[in-house]
Amino acid sequence: MKEKIIDTSITLFEQKGFSDTSIQDIVDALGVTKGTFYYYFKSKEELLMDIHLRYIEELLEKQQEMIDDPTKTTKEKLLDIVYMLIHNIEKKGRQARIFFREMRHLNAEHLQNIKQKRDQFRYGVQALIERGIENGEFRQDLIPSIATLTILGAANWSYQWFKPDGEYPDAEVAKQMVTIFLEGIEK
């Protein structure tokens, strides 16, 4: 039942927004009582935090696996991470939209926890870029923090424009993005 509450809430939060979705809306959509909701969550904000944690912790786990892969180059690892972010929108687009759009509704303690995890992901990408600069795969004149934020800004914003059923599949979008990041668009 907990998973059904989460899935239904994600749908409602996406459609109506967090603020305009009540606990009553959630339980009505499921055909259960408020008691069922409160058995799993103390509040709607706690439910939102659960959604956020699931999203970012899964990304962190996958990112670490990619970074630790000894068979791939730094460029391949970066492509894998960008692909993961784009592909994740195909699989979990609703959850991504909730993560980015509704974060402002978390209380200060929960928001700090999510920001720490988000920063952990960012610094994982930045360490990868620094490694690529050190080993000669990437240009020496790059500022790793700016390169990192540029890549993550573009990849994370793709939840707004990437269409999984669109003209280009997620793998091609990720490949194009990394090519632009690493090679630029100059002739």
Image (cartoon, rainbow, N blue to C red):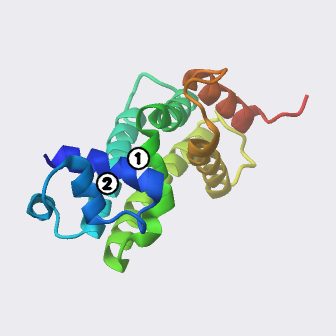
**Placement of 183 over or under 11, stated as above or below:** above
What label sits on residue 118 in the rendered view? none
Q: Which residue occupies the extreme right position in the image?
A: 187
Under mark 2, the amino acid is Ile
Residue 73 at x, y percent in the picture: 52, 27
Q: Residues within 10 Å of mark 2 (few under 14, many from 20)?
A: some
- Between the C-alphas of marks 1 and 2, the distance is 7 Å
Q: Residue at x 32, y 42 (%)?
A: 61
Give left or right: position of 178 versus 62: right
Question: Residue sitting at 64 percent across and 33 percent down?
Answer: 137
Residue 127, position in %: x, y?
50, 49
Between residue 141 and residue 102, name the one nearer to us. 102
Q: Where's residue 165, x and y in %?
A: 57, 23
- Horizontally, is 27 left or right of 74 in the view? left
Q: Which residue is mark 1?
A: 95
Three-letter amino acid code of the residue under disc 1: Gln
Query: Which residue shows up at 37% across the image and 71% down it?
Result: 106
Labels 1 and 2 touching (C-beta < 8 A): yes
Q: Residue at x 91, y 28 (%)?
A: 187
Label 1 or label 2, whichever comes before in sequence order: 2
Residue 55 at x, y = what percent?
Answer: 35, 48
Q: Is residue 61 left or right of residue 76?
A: left
**Label total for image:** 2
Mark 1: few/some/many CA within 10 Å (<14, 14-19, 20+): many
Q: Quadrant of residue 59?
A: top left
Q: Is residue 135 above or below residue 38?
A: above
Residue 61 horizontal side relative to residue 135, left or right? left
Instruction: Check residue 51 in the rendering and tell me which mark sits there, or answer none.
Output: 2
Q: Quick check: can you spot residue 160?
A: yes
Whether residue 123 is visible, yes or no, is no
Under circle 1, the secondary element is helix
Q: Could you tell me which secondary element the residue under label 2 belongs to?
A: helix
